[in-house]
Image: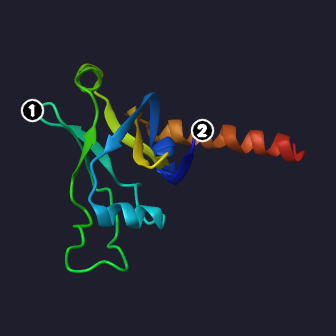
Amino acid sequence: MGIKIISKNKRAFYDFVISERLEAGIQLQGTEVKSLRAAQVRIADSFVTIDESKEAWIHNLHIPHYAFGNINNHVENRKRKLLLNRKEIDKLYHEMKSKNLTIVPISIYFKKSNVKVEIGLAKGKKLHDKRQDEAKKDAKKKIRLGDY
């Protein structure tokens, strides 16, 4: 299908329990796409909001300036609009408000020639949940390596 992953948000799975995933387009400028083609993006601190006019926005998605750009380069940390249809936005908004969830980006990738963002509805983990997950991961690793 022509999917090339640019970046994954590994921190999202450590800090959150992801319940539902969704693919969204993202509205970008030309130099942003060129920076993404060079795999320059920081997605770890970003999050998604839905405003009162029912539009989804991604914040803190850091795409650095294009190296060969000119004075018309993009702003690095601007909020960018996510391209979702009305049903998807309404569903996300309702789930987010009713269950007190957060929307976090999971990965950003090229699908054919379009830039897509995978977003997920997430609930924050407590400290003891993180410890349990690490203990399970360590146990699986020991079993796999034969160090039990």
Identify the disc placed on residue 127: none
**Which quarter shows the N terminus?**
top right
User: Could you tell which of marks 1 and 2 lies nearer the N-terminus?
Assistant: 1
Q: Residues within 10 Å of mark 2 (few under 14, many from 20)?
A: few
Residue 41 visible in the picture: no
Q: How many marks?
A: 2
- Residue 31 is situated, as x and y percent measured from the top left of the image, at 31, 67
Residue beneath label 1, please? 53
Residue at (29% x, 24% y) in the render:
88
What's under tag 1, amino acid-wise?
A: Ser
Residue pictured at 28% horizontal, 32% vertical = 84
Q: Position of residue 76 (x, y in %)?
A: 27, 66
- For this orientation, the residue located farthest to the right is 146
Does residue 54 appear left or right of residue 7 in this picture? left
Check disc 2 and give the amino acid type.
Asp
Q: Secondary structure at mark 1?
A: loop
**Position of residue 132 in the picture relative to residue 145 (left or right):** left
Q: Residue furthest left?
A: 52
**Could you tell me which quadrant the C terminus lies in?**
top right
Query: Regarding mark 2 in the picture, which secondary structure is present there?
Result: helix
Asked where in the image residue 85 lies, by quadrant, the reply is top left
- Of tags 1 and 2, the one toward the viewer is 1
Are there few (<14), some (14-19), or many (20+) residues within 10 Å of tag 1?
Answer: few
Q: Which residue is drawn at the image coordinates 35% and 73% (left, top)? A: 66
Residue occupied by mark 2: 133
**Residue 42 appears in the picture as rendered:** yes
**Cα distance between the residues tagged 1 and 2:** 38 Å
Residue 77: x %, y % from top left? 25, 62
- The x and y percentages for residue 47 are 31, 46
In front of the other: 95 or 126? 95
